[in-house]
Structure formats: structure tokens, C-alpha cells
Image: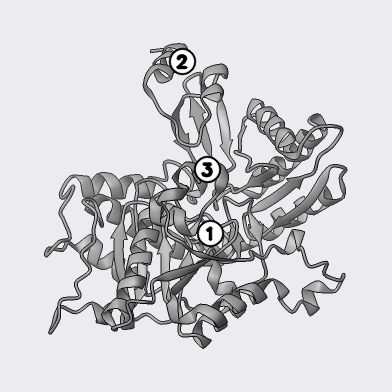
Amino acid sequence: MNTENYRDLDRQHLWHPYSRHSAMRDTAFPVIVRGEGVYLFDSDGRRYLDAISSWWACNLGHSHPRLVKAMTSQAQCLQHSILGNLSHPGAIELAARLAELFPDRRRRVFFSGDGASAVEAALKIAVQYWYNRGRPERRRFVSLGNAYHGDTLGAVSVGYVPEFHAPFQPLLFPVYRAEAPCCGTCAHNPPPSAVADCVQECVAPMADILEKNAAKIAAVIVEPICQGAAGMRIYAPACLAKMAALCRKHDVLLIADEIAMGFGRTGRMFAFEHAGIDPDIVCLGKGLAGGYLPMSATIVREALYETFTDQPADHTFYHGHTFAGNPVTAAVALETLRIYEEDRIVEHARKAGERLQEAMAPIRGLSGVRDVRGLGLLAVVELAESKGQSGPARARRMAAWLLQQGILIRPLGSVVYLMPPLITPDPVLDQLVGQVREALAQCS
């Protein structure tokens, strides 16, 4: 079957996530058939640099031989076995290995299949924790404005994005929303010395919400350090540290959604490490199994888990997914964690990230650029309106031009961002930044 045959069949039967009908109908979209390292290859043999790690997941690139071997080896002996009243070595070893990554290793690991499911589990665990303790009135949540936590209904409630979720608004439960910090486009008119002298005014609304409503609140949920789908809005570790301190002060649980930023993206294993905190519940996904197979996890403090005992009263967590902790996926996740440790992936990401940020910095002075920001192997260019073109329109033009040059990106409104695999070689990073600068010039 040739490429046009694939496209014709696709247009008849396939429903693409987060894709407009017109985009699939009117464009000659690539049909990807192979991946290798930091590149994807289409059915016509064209090569594309995967500059977004296939929706932020393939941190170790494509077709990593060790991950492929782990997948095929496990598939030969045990393909699936439920975790309900059973177990298997892969899930056991992976849970123990994940717990070791936290400052307080007294953790329990609840497996799911995708990030939104990990968030749903976290929300339900938080509510039932207070129910188990005889405080059922503590069932409300605090989230940040502009948050995104997935597309299931609970996740949408705490991460409501009007452009995505407006039809479902009547189905959502109420949530307290606090101002979301973003240092690059701070709304508080900080002085030039803001980095050194900032007093985190942006955290005051959350402090006010907790001061007035703590008795009704189960948990605060945040994307640590960077709000992804909101446009890669990066905020200072001090802001996150202050939020965590507020949660401790008011005896409110803190849920950290590390699904996008976890596993080295920010130059630390987890983004919350930048703030020196240890959240009560942490949601992981995307890169957990190298981006090769669907897996997520909700990591919970032992003190919370202990309230779910079934004696003398039954407080069992009656929640689960068919493929939670699947043996093949667990084998790939375990091998992913070994590669992270043995190849010092997080350290490499930190050093490569410094190189990326240095290369991107001169873009800040270009006409039509509102902000340039980044952290680790994440770099962002936020576009302003220029010469009658809106920021989002310019971003779409840049994406189309870069695709023609063999670079795959997906803008977020007026934000063009780069999240290449953590293994991306320095010369490729340099070339990528050069082509982004060229795209800015071509699409000005």
C-alpha cells in the first residue's frame, strides 16, 4: 500500500486525537512507519527529527535496542496477568524501584495505563483518604489556572481548558482555582532584580484559598515548575516550595503531576526536586516505559496507604484497570530506569539543556518574540502578533515550514516549544535551534 492509499483509508476511518478535521483532510500528512534514535521515518522514506519526543514521551528516542529486547523477551514468557489478588515479578520490582527514587521511600505504587488515569486515581485516593479518617467533608481540590491534567472527567475538572473542554463543563465537579505563576510573562510587574528578590506574589491567591477553605479541601494538585499544555509556562522553584509549605500548614495533601516533566526533562529526575520538596502523591506516565508502551503510576506515601485497611471497617480502594502493571510494559519500564541510571541520562539532559538554553537565548531579542524560556531539555519561544499576523497563526506557519525541513513540532497556541529526546546529540540540538531561528525569519 502506498502513501496515498494510506491517507485515503485514514481519512475514511481514523479519528485523530487533538486534530482538526480540516488538517487531516487538506494536508499531505506524514504516515510514519519507523523510528530510530531521535528520528521518525515516513512511508516515503523522509526523515523527521522528533523534536517533541512523540508527545513528550520518548525520552530515550525510538527503537532503543535494550527496550526492544526487554519488550520481546518478556512477551515470550508472560504477556498479561492481573494484579487483583495476584502479582508478578515485573510489577513488584518496578514498584520497589520507583519508591527508591523518592526522598521518603515509604511509598506505595498504584499502576494505571495513561496519565489521566494516574490523576484520576490520585484524586480518588485523596478523597477516600479523608473519608477513611472520618473527614468526608474534605473532598474539594485546589488547582492552578491554566492547568491541564488529562482528558477524563476528574482530570478535566482540576485541569479545565475552555478551548478543549467547554462541552463537558456541566459534568465537572467544582474546584478552587488559584493564580498560576509564570515567571517569563509575570503579571506582577517584577523589577529587573526579580529573580533574586521575588516574594512570590503569585502564590498569595492560593494562600487565601487555603486560609479560608482548608477544612473542605482534600488536596492541591499542580504541575511542578512547568505547566505543559498551557504553553510551557515555567515558574520558580520557590513558588512550588511555598505552595508545599502552605499545604503542610493547612494539613492539605499535595499532588504533583509529573506526567510530562518527570524522568529527566527538567534536568532533575522529577521537576519537584528543584524545589526540595517531597509531595504526598506523585503521578507519573509518558516516559515511565520509555514512551514505548502505555503505563502510568500513582505514587503514594505509606501513611496514606495505611488508612485503606479493611479491618475493622472496609476501606479498600475499589479502583483499577485491566492492564494495570502489565508484565510486558513493566519489563520495559524497568529497563528504562536501568538505562537512566547506567547511562546517566538525567545528568546528560541537564548539561545538554544548558547548551540548549544558551543557544536559544539570542532569540529573545528578535522582533515578534514575546518571551524565550526553558528548563533542561525544554525550550520555548512565545510569539507576539507581528505584521498583522497573530501569534498562533505565526506558530502554525513555523510548524508547517519546519515540517518541510524534516522537523516535527506541535505549537501550543502562540508557543513554539522544543522537547527533543533526552539522548539528542549536541550537534543535532545546535542544528535544531538554527532551523527554529530560520523558521522565525521565514514566517515573519
The disc at residue 323 is: none
Residue matched to label 2: 3
Question: For mark 1, does the 10 Å Cα neighbourhood hold few (<14), some (14 to 19), or many (20 or more) residues?
Answer: many
> Which amino acid, by three-letter code, is at mark 1?
Met
Instruction: Tell me the SS state at disc 1.
Output: loop
Q: How far apart are marks 1 and 2 (CA)?
A: 34 Å
Question: Which is more toward the observer, 137 or 358?
Answer: 137
**Residue 73 location, x and y as percent?**
24, 47
Left or right relative to 92: residue 277: right
Instruction: Tell me the SS state at disc 2.
Output: helix
**Residue 201 location, x and y as percent?**
72, 75
Hey, which quadrant is residue 211 in on the image? bottom right
Disc 1 to disc 2: CB gap under 8 Å: no
Q: In this rendering, does residue 244 appear at all? A: no
**Residue 401 location, x and y as percent?**
69, 28
Q: What residue do we see at 42% from left, 59% from top?
A: 173
